[in-house]
Amino acid sequence: NDILENACHGGKIALLGIFPDKAAIDWDKVIFNGLTITGIYGREMYETWYKMTVMLQSGLDIKPAITHRFGFRDHEAAFAAARSGDSGKVIMDWTAAREGG
């Protein structure tokens, strides 16, 4: 519900990914703040990528959303972090794979 607390009046929220458990939503905050919630899935993926590219080129700083980084060999730990519910975005770095390492 942090996103509901921080959304501006009339704000738009896009939900990406899958929740590990049922998520409770404070509908009063959605209604009284005039929020729009949209779920995004594969069918809209390319449009989402385009919009994100534009936001990044405009200077959006995504670093605060990244909570974990793993090398590709640590994939089990990376997926465990993503499933834990205690992470933001989990990044797997494939640089070493390209370099033959």
Image: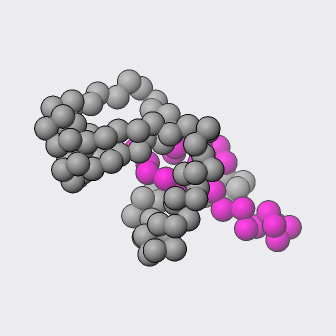
| 31 is higher (above) or lower (below) than 74 | above
Asked whether residue 85 appears in the rendered view, the answer is no
Quarter holding residue 19:
top left
Quadrant location of the C terminus? Answer: bottom right
Q: Residue at x 52, y 43 (%)?
A: 82
Q: Position of residue 23 (x, y in %)?
A: 34, 28
Q: Position of residue 34 (x, y in %)?
A: 20, 41
- Numbered range of the magenta stretch: 75-101
**Relative to 7, 100 lies left or right:** right
Q: Residue at x 81, y 67 (%)?
A: 98
Q: Residue 45 lies in magenta, yes or no? A: no
**Relative to 24, 53 lies left or right:** right
Quadrant location of the N terminus? Answer: top left
48 or 92: nearer the eye? 48
Q: Residue 83 lies in magenta, yes or no? A: yes
| 23 is higher (above) or lower (below) than 41 | above
19 or 11: nearer the eye? 11
Q: Position of residue 31 (x, y in %)?
A: 18, 34
2 or 37: nearer the eye? 37
Which residue in the rendered view is the most extreme toward the top?
A: 22
Q: Residue at x 43, y 70 (%)?
A: 60
